[in-house]
Amino acid sequence: MSTPILDIKGLSIALPKGSDRALALDALNLQVNSGEIVCLVGESGSGKSLTAGAVMRLLPEPHVHVASGQVLFDGEDVLAKSESQMRALRGNAMSMIFQEPMTALNPQKTVGWQLDEVLRLHMKASRKERRAHALSMLQRVHIPEPDSAYHAYPHQISGGQRQRVMIAMALSLSPRLIIADEPTTALDVTTQLQVLKLIADLQSENGAGVLFITHDFGVVAEIADRVVVLQHGQMVETGTATQVLNAPKHPYTQSLIAAVPDLTPPPATLLDDAPVVLRGSALNKSFIARGGLLSGRRNAVKAVKDVSFELRSGQTLGVVGESGSGKTTVSRIVTRLLEADSGSVELEGTDLLSCSARQMRAHRKRIQVIFQDPMASLNPRKRVIDLIAQGPIVHGENPAEARARARDLLALVELSPAAADRFPHEFSGGQRQRIGIARALALEPKVIVADEPVSALDVSVQSQVLKLLVELRDKMQLSLLFVTHDLRVAAQLCDNVIVMQSGAIVESGPTAEVFANPQHAYTRKLMNSIPGKSWTPPTAKQLSDSAKA
């Protein structure tokens, strides 16, 4: 048998004193062979990302460090290599796609500069050849107008496009080992399939091995050869994808699979007589995009085209579509984080777009936002309790009472009381998203605009948070404008849905009707692109029978 590309032997990773456990990873054994995709799954905090950090030698040492074990890459222990030797490997022989592109990309450098940096370090080629190679990679990951994206800064492209830039950087030198840490989290379903196919193509071309970290069991069903399940740093189950997905043995694996949202929407309770709490009318927004390097022209891109919608009290309206379809632009216009070119947004009869800055400040208590990228939206210098209590304090609540309620909200989103006194960088991506949700709930708003609020969460926590949002919606007559690329989540949460393509609404209606019988070709394309669509999670009885077997 040939030597595995990656062979992890007895790897243990120690956490700082005072952590909830001594070891983030406890004696992990894992192999990745040439041409094989191994999916590493588990809840947030299970040790998945730290496993990737150890392989790449990117752990936040000395506080978090390898306590014992070996990490063999092509038979050589990377833990014994010098930093200069690791720099020669990283980006060249082994590469990593990070979970949060906005924190991994340099905000002061253009996309093209950052792609070229990787090529300058490892590729002997002229500047012209490197630029051609970088543009080719942007095309391969299906970024529209690659030349425009090449000259743009990270904040000038959408979240999904930033993730595709990260993937282009990681794959640009055809590495032997690809470590993908939630690489499709921010991507719409069609792009997910394109990226998964791209990774598979690279394997067939170069025999690369892939360690694929994900919480999306649809992605696991689509691409995995083998699956490794982690719980609290320990491997509790491993096997082929067919074995683990269809006949899981361990109770923890069964609980994860049981939490996967069903693609069939439940019967909706449509409150057609409920008052309209939020109404968008004839919204339009254009952006100035960068043109080519030589032409210097600047092209107007119409991001939102004559969009109108109604959100009734106690309902959830889903906004779905591909990256760049205008979903997030609509959510930012609604909350006045972005100015519309024309149109109106009425919140309980008040046109927010015509309010002055001072008037808008008073209305923000009634409409709150859960952002897509938690690390970019949380102040890294403030403790969690202050981040959550900040809004109520600004609006006049007693600071002591606001902080006490902040601790209650942490419990609601399944975080320990100890989390209150820590900083955002001390949490995993999924935990940071839960902090963002708690912060949005702190002001008890009438409307929450949620921009991909569960995209970074593992399936079990995702299920808990969605259940929490439904309970809060029903109890407080809360209304949700829910932006998502995850059609499984939309199916289970949204009463109505609007489908956007290139800034315009192409289809709308009750979620159950749209999912059961999509009328527009674009909607049908989205439905057919859902990763793992052909896989049906086992029923509760099948899981019970599997446990007894």
Image (tube, rainbow, N blue to C red):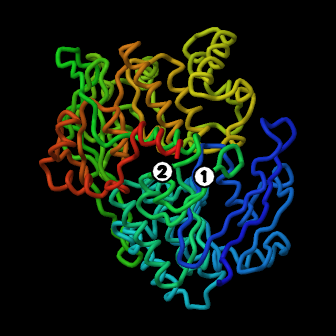
Marks 2/1: CA–CA distance = 14 Å
Give the left or right position of residue 476, taking residue 77 as reference: left
Q: Residue 437's x, y, as percent?
A: 52, 30
Give the number of the disc on residue 229: 1
Residue drawn at x 63%, y 28% is 387
Tell me the crowding category of disc 2: few under 14, some 14 to 19, or many 20 or more residues within 10 angstroms, Cα based. many
Amino acid marked by disc 2:
Ala
Task: Identify the image quadrant of residue 414.
Answer: top right
Q: Residue 275's x, y, as percent?
A: 23, 15
Q: Residue 362's x, y, as percent?
A: 45, 17
Of residues 86 and 488, the one drawn nearer to the viewer in this rendering? 488
Q: In the image as oriented, which residue stretches furthest toward the left?
A: 519
Residue drawn at x 21%, y 32% is 309
Q: Residue 192's x, y, as percent?
A: 40, 60
Amino acid marked by disc 1:
Val
SS of the residue under disc 1? strand
Task: Identify the image quadrant of residue 16.
Answer: top right
Task: Identify the image quadrant of residue 436.
Answer: top right
Determine contact: label 2, label 1, CB under 8 Å.
no
Pointer 2 or 1: first along the chain: 1
SS of the residue under disc 2? loop
Give the vertical position of 548 relative to 110 (above or below). above
Q: Is residue 107 visible?
A: no
Of residues 314 and 386, the one drawn nearer to the viewer in this rendering? 314
Disc 2 designates what residue? Answer: 247
